[in-house]
Amino acid sequence: MKSIFHNYKCSGLEKLLLLISFLLLAWAIISQVKGTGWNVWFETNSLDHIGSFMGGLFAVLSIYYLIKNLAEQRQITAIQSFESNYLEIVKFCRAQVEQACVPNPDSSKKDEQQIKARDIFNLFFSQIEAAVEDIKIYMQDKQFSELFVTRQEYEHQLQIWDDKLQDRTFSSIAYMITYMGVRKLNNNLLKNKYLSQYNPTYIDELLKCFKKRLAQYAPNKLKNPTGDRLHQIDIQNCNDKEYYGFQDEIGNYFRLLYQAVSYVDNQQILAYQEKYNYVKILRGQMSNMEEVVLFYNSLCDLGLAWEYEESEKDLITKYNLIKNIPADLTKISFERFYPNVYYEYLKEKPAGRKEYKN
């Protein structure tokens, strides 16, 4: 971990104090010599006076350096406390990933072929991308403004997102459906809370489409197509869904990830480059798929605090949290929402990055 210890350099104040001390010493010596008629041989008592004078002067300097040393010791203690807490948060964050486990929707048995750890984000990403495409297809013959619960809500969101509103809306709905899942226990929560700003009729129709998609381990009698009404109700109520949801397994992961980065960002004892290096340690442990899912998370209401909340922390851009996403990977352009991230495939840094270093 990066420490506050650097090659020591005198500050401007220290240089000024040293200059004043040498000037006073020269003044005292010259005054004594002048008092003896410019004879460099003068009495011992005169030397005692000079020594007493300079002793008092250096006592003042000693007090200054003592205070400075105590301040540096407090800073060192603060840094050590920060590093200890930060490492614990990072540790818990990675533990959430390593312990996570979801059923594989492509497996014929729910208790076998579980998807674990980092591989979860591969499934998460692929389902978000598929959901984005399905939502786009669903909205092809509909007026986009009608997707919102009221015209006022549409105009409000348009004022915030401008020409990025459609991409943001599709990605946000797709993320929430994928994250929460479409099992029966999450249906009301999705409609009444997380997707309440959208037209309830459209959301109901979308959710019905996703509920029809059963996992391979669902009972075979439900997977057989039929127009029977009771059969369709059973399919809707069945919890063995392809879009099972990820909230239960990695819900804490995003909260811990945000806490870790926000904790570093709030450290006033660190310079920007030092903060960047700490966050870089965390980012180095994230896979590309984790960064992609983080991108989608930051566009939904749950993750706006990363960049698009009124607090304007710009955490994703400031610390290049999604810089390792391969070019042209996503259906929703991440470069459009985060143009000042220095992606690894870029040859030159975006001009907007200069403000962070300043």
Image (tube, rainbow, N blue to C red):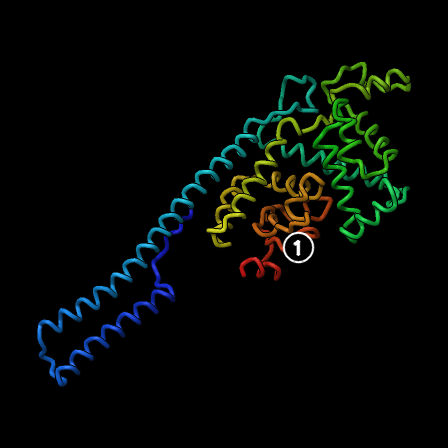
Please give the count of numbered marks on the rendered protein: 1
* Whole-percent x, y for residue 215 in the image: 73, 22
Q: Is residue 259 left or right of residue 149?
A: left
* Kind of residue indicated by mark 1: Pro
Mark 1 surroundings: few (<14), some (14-19) or many (≥20) residues within 10 A = some
* Whole-percent x, y for residue 25 in the image: 23, 72
Q: 41 or 272, which is in the foreground?
A: 41
* Whole-percent x, y for residue 277 in the image: 48, 49
Residue 345 shows in this picture: no
Q: Quadrant of residue 83?
A: top left
Residue 342 shows in this picture: yes
Q: Is residue 320 left or right of residue 161?
A: left
Q: 288 or 299, which is in the foreground?
A: 299
Q: 274 or 269, which is in the foreground?
A: 269
Query: What residue is shown with label 1?
Result: 339
Residue sitting at 81 percent across and 17 percent down?
222
Residue at the bottom extreme of this rendering: 37
Residue sitting at 80 percent across and 36 percent down?
196
